[in-house]
């Protein structure tokens, strides 16, 4: 998580080019963006009192270039309508997400994302 | 060559499909209340209504700790029907849910409210409902119940009642004890028993109509059952020594209690139709404060048999006993949630008495309150809140804390000392 706290696109010392370094660097960059998206959604996610550890809802979000939310759908429900709605609301309230400006990277990784809401900080 | 190209291309395609759907795990969230707006309900008659229904609904939802109702003065519009709703007005205020409605006069002096709940961000109606009553407060609580259930997935308990005892000093060595029934928001309070002698341990029967308590109105403490509708009182016990801590079985047919007629305080169970008494515990240490497991098969009680007050569970048929609490050297006054999972209690840590909850599935203990001298926890029938008595400004007041400890609210209270609240079942 520490790594994910950093701002994306921070200049890092240019590594010696090797056969795999480009894709490793790309992976790191993607991971950082994903970390920021994760934190953004966490800041908007208010769980209903019926939420319990072990409940999981999976959503698919489609983003527009620039990171604006296009649509959100439930792909696997938790079985608790209030819990599912709280996840959808978190995404809709966030509304916009930080994504790479490079259209190729955006298309490849960020146009469509799965979000798995799986609370680990609930009391019960 | 062609085959090889094909395989490479296929692998690249596979990789791109696998990458195309990255998954983000969201494992943390906020512990905030949900922003909601309850717009004043429409009323087209010339007379003024005696109660402000949407204000009562807002207060109910606020008191649950799960909602943060929008201040009326901040509303940009006040729609009373769906065609007047502009989602943008509510979105800019960060309101997640919107409730609008209309009050309509119904037959025989009754009122009806037609209301609708909207999801502001998804821009759609999620529930339409109608409630009716001759009492506007009751109508408002019924609307709150529907809103709460729709938005949280948990049945609302706003239409329930509570019992509590007040003690007022009338002069030197002269007190007045009163037993009240009130709505859980503190309104509609009504005295059902008044006495210069102490009234203790009031508790509800599962039918939500009868109550049991200990009164010193005759020469010695006795257990009584009273019908809250007719006021009729029936004496159940009057044994020599202690007659205390009555608790109805989940089916309402039996009453657990503490009697010291055979020596020291022990738990007994009385069959209410026959009056037949069964002794449950037999120990030289004090056994007291019985309550029932939801299946009616066990009695949960406080005992000093281990050297300090701790909570135990005893199977009635077999007599098998199990200790439930191990944290610290004082755990007493057990109360179980209706699903039997959570055990509320008075827990002492560092010499201070708090309300705590033990999750009997995971075995963890959570201290919920930060005040001192917290006592008599009583759980809401939907297990969302725990009502308890505490000290504030040198006198007893009632407070409620959510089961997760997130919110504490003090209830409007009367003069004098308020003690021993008991939350009714669903009515």
Image: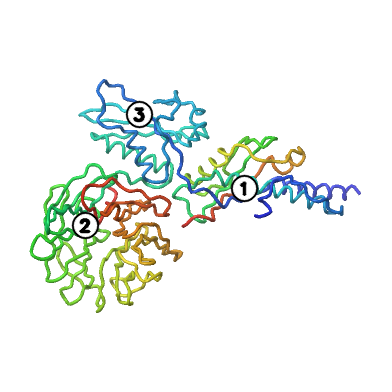
Residue A84 percent across, percent down from the top left: 51, 45
The answer to whether dots 2 and 1 both sit on one chain is no
> Residue B202, which numbered label?
2
Quick check: B189 above or below B394? above
Of all residues shown, which one is farthest toward the top? B46
Instruction: Report the residue at 21% width, 70% height from top.
Output: B268
**In this rendering, would B66 be left or right of B122?**
left
Q: Classify 10 Å Cα crowding around label 2: few (below 14), some (14-19), many (20 and above).
A: many
Residue A18 percent across, percent down from the top left: 87, 54
**In this rendering, would B395 be left or right of A31?**
left
Q: CA distance from mark 2 to mark 1?
A: 50 Å
Q: Chain of mark 2?
A: B
Q: Chain of mark 1?
A: A
Residue at numbered disc 3? B41
Q: Chain of mark 3?
A: B
Quarter of the rendering containing residue B56: top left
Residue at numbered disc 1? A38
Q: Earlier in the sequence, mark 2 or mark 3?
A: 3
**In this rendering, would B140 be left or right of A108?**
left
Q: Classify 10 Å Cα crowding around label 1: few (below 14), some (14-19), many (20 and above).
A: many
Q: CA distance from mark 3 to mark 1?
A: 39 Å
Q: Classify 10 Å Cα crowding around label 3: few (below 14), some (14-19), many (20 and above).
A: many
Quick check: B35 above or below B19? above
| Element under disc 2 | strand
Of all residues shown, which one is farthest toward the left? B219
| Element under disc 1 | helix
> Residue B150, which numbered label?
none
**Given contact means CB atoms under 8 Å apart, are the residues at marks 2 and 3 in contact?**
no
Of all residues shown, which one is farthest toward the right? B1
| Element under disc 3 | loop
């Amino acid at each position: 998580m520490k790594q994910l706290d950093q701002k994306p696109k921070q200049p890092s010392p240019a590594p010696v080019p090797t056969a795999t370094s480009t894709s490793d660097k790309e992976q790191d960059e993607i991971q950082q963006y994903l970390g920021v998206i994760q934190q953004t959604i966490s800041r908007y996610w208010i769980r209903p009192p019926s939420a319990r550890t072990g409940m999981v809802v999976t959503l698919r979000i489609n983003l527009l270039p620039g990171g604006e939310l296009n649509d959100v759908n439930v792909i696997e429900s938790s079985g608790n309508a209030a819990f599912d709605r709280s996840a959808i609301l978190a995404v809709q309230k966030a509304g916009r997400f930080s994504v790479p400006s490079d259209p190729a990277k955006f298309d490849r990784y960020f146009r469509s994302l799965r979000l798995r809401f799986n609370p680990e900080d609930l009391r019960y | 060559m062609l085959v090889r190209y094909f395989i490479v291309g296929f692998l690249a395609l596979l990789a791109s499909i696998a990458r195309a759907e990255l998954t983000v795990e969201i494992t943390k969230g906020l512990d905030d209340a949900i922003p909601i707006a309850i717009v004043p309900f429409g009323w087209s008659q010339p007379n003024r209504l005696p109660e402000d229904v949407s204000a009562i609904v807002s207060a109910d939802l606020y008191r649950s700790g799960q909602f943060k109702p929008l201040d009326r003065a901040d509303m940009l519009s006040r729609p009373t029907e769906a065609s007047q709703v502009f989602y943008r007005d509510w979105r800019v205020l960060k309101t997640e849910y919107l409730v609008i409605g209309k009050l309509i006069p119904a037959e025989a002096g009754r009122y009806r409210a037609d209301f609708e709940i909207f999801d502001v961000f998804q821009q759609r109606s999620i529930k339409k409902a109608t409630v009716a009553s001759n009492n506007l407060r009751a109508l408002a609580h019924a609307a709150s119940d529907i809103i709460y259930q729709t938005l949280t997935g948990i049945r609302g308990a706003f239409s329930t009642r509570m019992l509590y005892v007040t003690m007022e000093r009338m002069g030197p060595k002269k007190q007045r004890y009163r037993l009240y029934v009130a709505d859980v928001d503190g309104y509609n309070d009504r005295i059902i028993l008044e006495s210069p002698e102490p009234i203790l341990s009031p508790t509800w029967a599962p039918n939500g109509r009868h109550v049991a308590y200990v009164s010193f109105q005759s020469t010695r403490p006795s257990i009584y059952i009273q019908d809250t509708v007719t006021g009729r009182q029936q004496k159940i016990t009057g044994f020599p020594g202690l007659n205390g801590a009555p608790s109805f079985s989940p089916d309402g047919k039996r009453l657990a209690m503490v009697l010291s007629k055979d020596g020291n305080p022990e738990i007994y169970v009385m069959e209410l139709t026959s009056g037949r008494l069964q002794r449950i515990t037999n120990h030289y240490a004090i056994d007291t404060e019985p309550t029932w497991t939801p299946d009616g098969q066990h009695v949960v009680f406080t005992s000093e048999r281990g050297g300090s007050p701790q909570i135990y569970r005893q199977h009635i048929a077999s007599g098998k006993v199990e200790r439930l609490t191990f944290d610290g050297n004082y755990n007493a006054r057990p109360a179980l949630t209706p699903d039997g999972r959570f055990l509320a209690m008075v827990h002492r840590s560092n010499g201070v008495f708090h309300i705590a909850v033990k999750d009997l599935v995971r075995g963890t203990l959570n201290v919920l309150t930060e005040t001192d001298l917290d006592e008599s926890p009583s759980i809401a029938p939907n297990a969302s809140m725990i009502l308890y008595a505490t000290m504030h400004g040198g006198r007893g007041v009632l407070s409620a804390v959510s089961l997760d400890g997130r919110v504490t609210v003090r209830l409007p209270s009367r003069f004098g000392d308020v003690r021993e609240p008991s939350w009714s079942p669903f009515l």
